[in-house]
Amino acid sequence: MLAKVFSAAVLGIDAFLIEVEAHLESQLPAFATVGLPDSAVRESKERVNAAIKNSNLPFAQKRITINLAPADIRKEGSSFDLPIAIGILVASGIISQEQIQDYVILGELSLDGSLRPIRGALPIAVEMGKNHKRGIILPVENASEAAMSQGIKVYPVASLAATIQFLSGELPIEPFLVSLEEIFSRGRQHIIDFQDVKGQEHVKRALEVAAAGGHNIIMIGPPGSGKTMLAKRFPTILPDLTLEQALETTKIHSVAGLLPSHTPMIATRPFRSPHHTISDAGLIGGGQVPRPGEVSLAHHGVLFLDELPEFKKNVLEVMRQPLEDGVVTISRAALSLNYPAQFMLSAAMNPCPCGYATDPTHECSCTPQQIQKYLSRISGPLLDRIDIHIEVPTCMIGTTNFCLN
């Protein structure tokens, strides 16, 4: 018998509909998954088998073939566990095809039949609302995130058994609703504030100009002058995110799996500060399984690169195009993905290898050749894309350079 269940997958930060087809045939028991599945999808047969049995439901002792259509797009992740299990149960006659026809189903199964959260619930809910489906069924942990789409009814379920009961009408579940305005206003609070900084008036003025005009900025000064402290508070003086910008930023963090469980929306400007050992794929995005990089996670926010000359030269150079275009394009043989990357670059560096070339209280031990080699680690084309260069002097009590938080 053949059954068809609707699910969804994410490509970049956009979602598309997937048809999960389950075919049962009276042959020796076997389980095959086709349609370009990755290893996580292929392993779903073990999770599905155990989840069905541990939910006190019969598992068909037949040859089972699962097809994920369209078959020319690679399917990734564990969100197909629940639709595959539902498809097998429909094909076995446990529930009818008509009961699932208007739903999009997502979820990762535990061996005991309970559901774990998935990635990309928000972009999936936004896109599925355009497909005129009755609702989306997904794990409870993803309900508040998906409900922000406002375009489709969200039905949270905790287990495979609860999903079966809901589809058969035995367990009524009300659509999960959230107040976008309430979540948006509640999330627009900063733990730290720019006004905490006392002193360094000319540096604060430069940051205010950068915030007003959307300029990239680099701060050059000795250790302890307050560069990192100022950079961390830089997002707090930027204009507030609009609701549309907040949703777009949230979609990126949702796809990356970095959306906190207690925060269904990123309502403040993101601040990303990667370590200088980061790779170019980690900064820009990509990898064997493409994921958004730090420049995309800083979308509509600030990307702070501390100790700028310590970053690998090839890592810094790949930022040149995103700084100009505001988008990252990751091209592969089979597909091409676009991740938005409209961020402000804030960087900090020492004036020399030892850090004390401009410090009146410490003696610099670097030769002119060492200083020149240190500064040359940053290319001219990259520096041209940084509009404001500001010197941050040593913090000294009793002067305007005194800084404190």
Image: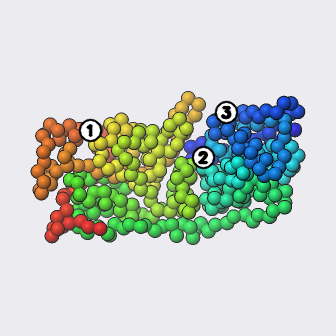
* Residue drawn where x is 28% and y is 40% of the image: 378
**Of callouts 2 and 1, the N-terminal one:** 2
Residue 320 in the image, given as x and y percentages of width and height:
37, 40
Residue 102 in view in this figure: no
Between residue 94 and residue 263, name the one nearer to us. Answer: 94
Which mark's residue is nearer the viewer, 2 or 3?
3
Numbered mark located on residue 377 in the image: 1
Which quarter of the rendered picture does the N terminus lie within?
Answer: top right
Numbered mark located on residue 14 in the image: 2
Q: What is the secondary structure assignment of the residue under circle 2?
A: strand
Q: Seen in the image, is 294 located left or right of residue 376? A: right
Q: Seen in the image, is 252 located left or right of residue 357? A: right
Q: What is the secondary structure assignment of the residue under circle 1?
A: loop
**Of callouts 1 and 3, the N-terminal one:** 3
Three-letter code, disc 3: Leu
* Residue drawn where x is 77% and y is 50% of the image: 54
Which quarter of the rendered picture does the C terminus lie within?
Answer: bottom left
* Residue drawn where x is 56% and y is 63% of the image: 262
- Mark 1–mark 3 Cα distance, whole angstroms, equals 43 Å
Q: What is the secondary structure assignment of the residue under circle 3?
A: loop
* In contact (CB < 8 Å): disc 1 and disc 3: no
Q: Which residue is mark 3?
A: 36
Three-letter code, disc 1: Arg
Which mark's residue is nearer the viewer, 2 or 1?
1
The type of colouring in the image is: rainbow
Three-letter code, disc 2: Asp
Q: Seen in the image, is 274 located left or right of residue 387? A: right
